[in-house]
């Protein structure tokens, strides 16, 4: 469903699976059958361990405002685990509490096998669970809680994060009123019982929920649908496969490119990338929004129950206040509200590699392809600066936002050969 959350865990205990299958056999309806996997996951969680008494509290019982850093359109917050750290976590509307195994090992936590996990992407991977005494966001504390343990290393390398230690978010959104000030890069948590909206927030939109993730109705190029609101989605707008197929959007949109658009727990996210002429939601009308239509047939983006996902590329145009208790979302336009939505102008997807920066994907007919770059080439320098001194996220942003006509010189290694290539950026969509 999204790049980092909506992770489903399947148990390998055959007895549990057998019991669940027997129960589900009494419900032949196809829609019910689509939820069999989710049911199995919930049953595993219910029977595998006794319920925990978790507490999520504000320091001193007062509203807490904490800073965040926006990296690759993801909200990163420092989190102390069991008094150690801080570690770098993504704050995500649908993000279950997740730790990377390296962090769990550093903390000496006991891991129990928890089947397999997947989210966006087509693949699955091993999962574990562990108990955490405290996760402190330096103003908000989660106590005595279970965390899933899933490797995030492939995502870290593919995106280029310096650190990616875990995820939090979903339960914090459920517990508090949460304000995300993208312009000021702060999160504010307030008690729902004592919070009241200031008059400057205006009229709220009414939230729905899909598997615990907030949703809003929206209209893209005249087509109506229900969209999840996903702070863990780096893109602007994602249209899920069934919605795309139902409206024959791939055939209708002739100006598009096929490119890797991100990386999830299940691997790369290839997609057709277009621009939506119009996108209307929550009383706002946007134009020229970069929109991806993933090519995956499995995983979260294959859901038929929602039309797609509104990601940070759109959300960061606003100050967003989520009030789950009242099912309200307040959006206040920020300084970036009317800024044009940039799209990659190089045709490259790059990832971290021990030898430098690895070319993972090259768009056919793009500036990167015309320069002679190929998959598995290693970029050792950019404009003469060694790859080891570069922050890949910043480089990716440059390849997206630098003006058309900008030339970028790459020093490339393939096998034992070194060469320089020049990419001249241009609009692809």
Image (cartoon, rainbow, N blue to C red):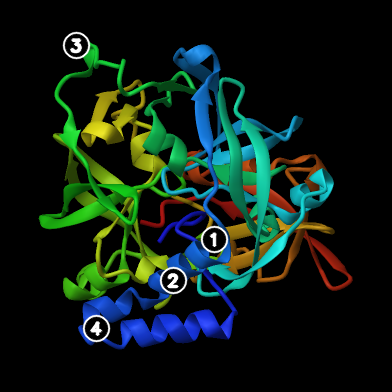
Which residue is at a point 40% across and 85% down the rendered structure image?
A: 21
**Mark 3 burial class by Cα count in 10 Å: few <14, some 14-19, many 20+:** few
Number of other residues with Cα within 10 Å of mark 1, as a class: few under 14, some 14 to 19, many 20 or more: many
Looking at the image, residue 282 sits to the left or right of residue 259; the answer is left
Q: Name the element at disc 2.
A: loop
**In the rendered image, the vertical position of residue 207 relative to residue 203, given as above or below:** below
Going from N to C along the chain, the mark reached first, 2 or 1, is: 1
Residue receiving disc 3: 199
Q: Which mark is residue 299?
A: 2
Q: Position of residue 45 (x, y in %)?
A: 51, 63
Looking at the image, do the residues carrying marks 4 and 2 touch, with CB atoms under 8 Å apart? no
Mark 4 / mark 2, whichever is N-terminal: 4
- Tally the marks: 4
Residue 263 seen in the figure:
yes
The label nearer to you, 4 versus 3, is 4
Q: Nearer the viewer, residue 254 or 50?
A: 50
CA distance for labels 3 and 2 = 41 Å
Q: Would you place residue 258 above or below residue 315 in this image?
A: below
Precedes in sequence: disc 4 or disc 3: 4
Q: For numbered disc 4, what is the local secondary structure?
A: loop
Q: Residue at the spot x=68%, y=59% of the render? A: 151
Return the disc, 1 or 3, that comes first in the chain's sequence.
Answer: 3
**How many other residues sit within 10 Å of disc 2, few (<14), some (14-19) or many (≥20)?**
many
* Circle 1 SS class: strand
Q: Residue furthest right?
A: 416
Q: Which residue is mark 1?
A: 264
> Is disc 3 placed on a helix, strand or loop?
helix
């Amino acid at each position: 469903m999204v790049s980092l959350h909506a992770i489903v865990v399947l148990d390998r205990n055959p007895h549990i699976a057998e019991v669940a299958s027997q129960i589900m056999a009494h419900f032949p309806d196809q829609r019910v059958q689509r939820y069999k996997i989710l049911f199995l996951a919930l049953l595993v969680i219910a029977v595998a361990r006794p319920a925990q008494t978790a507490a999520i509290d504000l320091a001193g019982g007062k509203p807490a405002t904490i800073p965040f850093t926006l990296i690759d359109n993801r909200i990163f917050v420092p989190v102390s685990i069991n008094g150690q750290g801080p570690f770098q976590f993504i704050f995500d509307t649908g993000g279950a509490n997740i730790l990377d195994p390296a962090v769990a090992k550093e903390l000496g936590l006991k891991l129990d096998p928890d089947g397999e996990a997947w989210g966006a992407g087509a693949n699955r991977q091993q999962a574990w669970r562990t108990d955490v005494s405290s996760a402190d966001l330096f103003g908000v504390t989660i106590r005595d809680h279970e965390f899933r343990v899933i490797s995030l290393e492939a995502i870290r390398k593919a995106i280029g994060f310096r650190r990616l230690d875990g995820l939090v978010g979903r339960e914090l959104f459920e517990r508090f009123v949460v304000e995300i000030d993208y312009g000021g890069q702060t999160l504010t948590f307030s008690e729902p019982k004592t919070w009241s909206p200031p008059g400057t927030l205006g009229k709220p939109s009414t939230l729905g929920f899909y598997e615990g993730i907030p949703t809003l109705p929206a209209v893209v190029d005249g087509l109506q649908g229900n969209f999840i609101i996903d702070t863990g989605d780096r893109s602007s707008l994602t249209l899920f496969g069934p919605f795309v197929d139902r409206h024959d959007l791939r055939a209708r949109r002739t100006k598009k490119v096929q490119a890797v658009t991100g990386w999830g727990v299940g691997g790369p996210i290839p997609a057709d990338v277009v621009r939506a002429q119009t996108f209307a939601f929550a009383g706002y009308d946007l134009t020229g929004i970069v929109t991806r239509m993933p090519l995956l047939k499995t995983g979260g983006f294959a859901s038929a129950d929602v039309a797609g996902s509104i990601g940070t590329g759109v959300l960061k145009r606003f100050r967003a206040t989520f009030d789950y208790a009242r099912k309200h979302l307040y959006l206040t336009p920020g300084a970036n509200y009317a800024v044009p939505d940039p799209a990659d102008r190089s045709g490259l997807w790059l990832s971290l590699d021990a030898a430098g920066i690895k070319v993972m994907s090259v768009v056919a007919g793009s500036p990167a392809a015309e320069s002679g770059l190929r998959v598995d080439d290693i970029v050792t320098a950019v404009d003469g600066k060694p790859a080891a001194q570069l922050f890949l996220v910043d480089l990716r942003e440059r390849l997206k936002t630098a003006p058309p006509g900008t030339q970028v010189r790459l020093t490339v290694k393939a096998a034992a050969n070194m060469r320089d290539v020049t990419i001249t950026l241009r609009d692809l969509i």
